Amino acid sequence: MFRLLWAASVYTSSFLRRYMPTNILLDAIRTRRGRKWGIPAMLLAVPYLIAAVTCSAWIAGGGPGWANVLLLLLIWNALKFIIMGPISLVLLGHTRVTERVQRNREPRSEADDVESVAQLHV
């Protein structure tokens, strides 16, 4: 029984990661090239929150019970985008520091020194 539940959760997680638009976008933001888009992606939380407020008003006005699941999904997606902004900034800072340390540790050749001096005199 436990093995069946574990397998179902793994397959569900794999499906959601691969095919749901918000997860695809968040995976793209986690890449090296996409980390700069974390803060602008936080703005995507605004339409989700507006939709959540609208759905909440619909439920309060006598809407169907299944709309609560939709409300939960909208709030969850908004929170994912709100949290990803600061996380992407931390990841971007860490990556830039790591890249700078690696550049400083590389041995410099004489050709690099000559090119840098030539660029200074131009």
Image (cartoon, grey):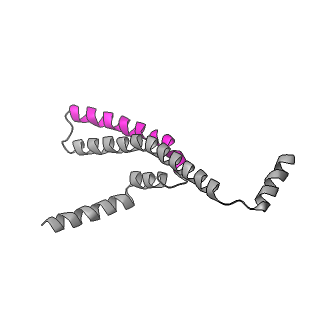
Q: Nearer the viewer, residue 87 or 47?
A: 87
Q: Is residue 88 magenta?
A: no
Q: Is 64 located above or below residue 118 in the figure?
A: above
What's the magenta bit mostly, secondary-structure-wise? helix
> Residue sitting at 74 percent across and 62 percent down?
109
Residue at 46% over, 53% down: 30
Identify the magenta region: 35-60
Locate residue 49, reporting x and y percent. Answer: 36, 36
| Residue at the spot 58% in from the left edge and 52% down from the top edge | 101
Location of residue 84 (image quadrant) = top left
Residue 11 percent location from the top left of the image: 28, 65
The answer, for residue 21, to whether it is visible in the render is: yes
Residue at the (32%, 33%) spot, across then down: 53
> Which image quadrant: the N terminus?
bottom left
* Pick the front one: 52 or 24: 24
Query: Would residue 122 be visible to someone looking at this image?
Result: no
Please provide percent x and percent y for residue 106: 64, 59
